[in-house]
Image (spheres, rainbow, N blue to C red):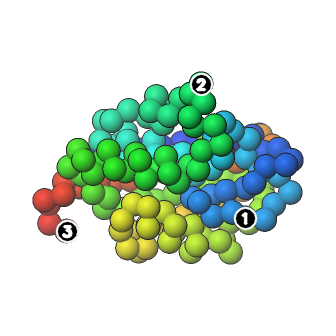
Amino acid sequence: MRVGLGRDLHRLVKGRRFLLGGVEIPAKRGEAGHSDGDVLAHAVCDAILGAASLGDIGGLFPPSDLEWKDADSMDLLRCAFAMVKKAGWKLSNLDCVVCCEEPKVLPFRDDIRRSLADALEVSVDRVFVKGKTGEGLGPVGKGRAVEALVVCLLEGQNEKD
Ligand code: MG
């Protein structure tokens, strides 16, 4: 078994969509980024890639590469997971924290869990998502950024539950 950690932060700006794990949430500001800016999808990519020692999202899908401009981050996640699977791993579970002042994550939690679980080919009970605020402090607390933290556990495809 392998544990992995992912973390990402994106600035929040007007005129962009607010996406978490492939789910669009109505909000006044959305995530800036070279891709679609989905901060949670990026942190999940880094967690699973790190657990499998396969690199990180910045190295595999560099922002300098025009191919990834406005990319659907869930496509990046599916691509990263395909590499993880090819290396002999499957996901045991994923636990995520999303930190932002607004919008509220809770009403969309189950949609996000389902979206991530589908991409990672597990049942929804193996994926959890929590929302936290920044208590008015720092870039997250001032509403200028959204941050995602993710831990995952991978297990060898032949290991029993
Ligand atoms: Mg990112």
Chain-order first, disc 2 or disc 3: 2
Image height check: is 30 above or below 23?
above
Q: Relative to residue 80, is residue 28 drawn left or right?
A: right
User: In which quarter of the view is residue 11 placed?
Assistant: top right
Q: Position of residue 127 (x, y in %)?
A: 44, 66
Chain-order first, disc 1 or disc 2: 1
Q: Nearer the viewer, residue 93 or 83?
A: 83
Image height check: is 44 above or below 21?
above
Q: Nearer the viewer, residue 105 or 157?
A: 157
* Inter-mark Cα distance, 2 to 3: 41 Å
Q: Relative to residue 150, is residue 23 drawn left or right?
A: right
Q: Position of residue 6 (x, y in %)?
A: 48, 43
Which residue corresponds to the image point at 23% horizontal and 44% vertical from the top-left?
87
Q: Nearer the viewer, residue 112 or 147?
A: 112
Mark 2 Cα shell of 10 Å, populated few (<14), some (14-19), many (≥20): few
Q: Which mark is on residue 64? A: 2
* Inter-mark Cα distance, 1 to 2: 27 Å
| SS label for mark 1 | loop
Q: Which residue is mark 3?
A: 161
Q: Give the amino acid at mark 2.
A: Ser
Q: Which of the two marks, 3 or 1, is nearer to us in this view?
A: 1
For the C terminus, the image quarter is bottom left
Mark 1 Cα shell of 10 Å, populated few (<14), some (14-19), many (≥20): some
Which residue corresponds to the image point at 27% horizontal and 57% vertical from the top-left?
90
**Residue found farthest to the top:** 64
Q: Relative to residue 26, is residue 69 drawn left or right?
A: left
Q: Position of residue 31 (x, y in %)?
A: 73, 46
Q: Give the amino acid at mark 3.
A: Asp
Q: Give the amino acid at mark 1.
A: Ile
